[in-house]
Amino acid sequence: MAFLVNETSGVYFTPLAPGDYLAHCIGVYYLGLQRNDLDPGKPPKGKLALEFEIAEEFQSNGQPQKLMSFFTMSLHKQSALRPFLEAWRGKPFDPTALASFDVSKLAGVPARLIVAHRPKQNGGVRAVIQMAIPIKLADKANLAQPITAPVLFDADTPDQFALSQLPEFLKVMIAKAEKPAPIPAEPANAVAGFDDDLLF
């Protein structure tokens, strides 16, 4: 008896179809200072991962369908994170928020995700989040709570229980993170509140 294998053999799952989906942010993960594998000579940058649970969509094993996006920890006008969050909020950041925005408040926040397919280098496609936008009031009223409890993780002050909840590939990234230089303590400033009609 022969057990045949070829370059396409392996375990596969069907990527989420392109479209728009209701979701909750169920993971806010600061991955620490990461070097660019394609240009390791550049200084490392803080990296953030946002994970979303897609409402009423499930994998073949019955687990909730999830998608993740990665960002550099920056709200500079040319960053990827700033326009992503501003589209999600439905409003630009004011100067106070730009000076210091707490990304942990994203955990548990609902969103409507615009999902597209992107080709993989080895063939096939993967589902990616193109944009997050605010959900409509009617959708918010009918949206069930996520199955997965939200998780916060900070590589600079790692919580071992939170770390145990993360996918293995994130644990590998976190293990490679470089330690930041010590920063002198500064007095705490009050964080300005947000408009009542904004989710965060």
Image (cartoon, helix red, strand yellow):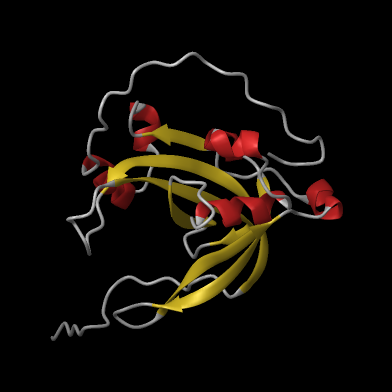
Q: In this view, does 25 lie to the left or right of 32?
A: right
Q: In this view, does 87 lie to the left or right of 34?
A: right
Rendering coords of residue 20 (x, y %) = 67, 68
What quarter of the picture does the N terminus occupy? bottom left
Quadrant in the picture for residue 147: top right
Q: Is residue 78 left or right of residue 93?
A: left
Q: In this view, does 63 lie to the left or right of 114?
A: left
In depth, the one of 192 and 50 nearer the eye is 192
Residue at horizontal 33%, vertical 28%? 160
Vertical comparison of 170 with 59: above or below: above
What quarter of the picture does the C terminus occupy? top right
Vertical comparison of 27 with 1: above or below: above
Rendering coords of residue 100 (x, y %) = 54, 33
Quadrant in the picture for residue 131: bottom right
Report the residue that reaches farthest toward the left.
Answer: 1
Report the residue that reaches farthest toward the right.
Answer: 138
Any part of residue 95 in sight = yes
Residue at horizontal 51%, vertical 56%? 66
